[in-house]
Image (cartoon, rainbow, N blue to C red):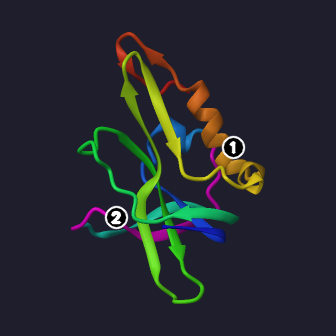
Amino acid sequence: MWFEGVDLTLVNLNPRHYITAHNVAYDKTLEYRSSDRPSPSVSLPAFDLEQTEVYLNHQFTDAREKTVLLGFRYEDRETGEVHMQDRAGWFKAVGKGLVFYFQPGHAASDFENASFCQILLNCLTWRVTGAGLRSDE
């Protein structure tokens, strides 16, 4: 299920990772409860995207063989129902490379958000070496 023209909050689920931390400005913190229950509510850095799209009920089909970076919080304006899911940004090794996925990016305004753009830039500057993954500044 998806909705467009909505406001969405991206939540940093991996605050110590280079991709989500290096030069990324988060203008608020949010009480977030993982969609993978059971889990406690935790306070995490977040920022908003306006007039974007949201996809609900994504499922991981690979036993979570990925590094999850971002989650989202979406509140349906009509029903007041709140959705929090750990599916807004992740990466995984595939063959000799990496695949990155980010839910935002369908609206041009997503790319006007400095925080989201910095996360995308961090994917390009994060180093991969023969010894494995590292997060050099």
Residue 133, by quadrant, is top left
Extreme-top residue of the structure: 130
Q: Image quarter for residue 129?
A: top left
Q: Please name whichever residue, 94 or 29, is drawn nearer the observer in this view of the structure.
A: 94
Which is the main secondary structure of the residues drawn in magenta? Answer: loop
The residue beneath circle 1 is: 117
Q: Is residue 112 visible?
A: yes
How far separated are the C-alphas under marks 2 and 1?
Answer: 24 Å
In the image, 53 versus 130, the foreground residue is 53
Quick check: 115 above or below 99? below
Q: Determine whether label 2 and label 1 are within 8 Å by CB.
A: no
Q: Is residue 66 left or right of residue 82?
A: left
* Percent coordinates x, y for residue 45 in the rendering: 52, 60
Give the vertical position of 16 relative to 70 (above or below). above
- Which residue is farthest front? 1
Q: Is residue 35 magenta?
A: yes
Query: How many badges with numbers are in the image?
Result: 2
Residue segment shown in magenta = 24-38
Q: Which residue is mark 2?
A: 34
Q: Is 9 included in the stretch rendered in magenta?
A: no
Q: Earlier in the sequence, mark 2 or mark 1?
A: 2
Which quadrant is home to the C terminus?
A: top right
Q: Residues within 10 Å of mark 2 (few under 14, many from 20)?
A: some
Q: Position of residue 107 (x, y in %)?
A: 72, 55
Q: Position of residue 55 (x, y in %)?
A: 51, 62
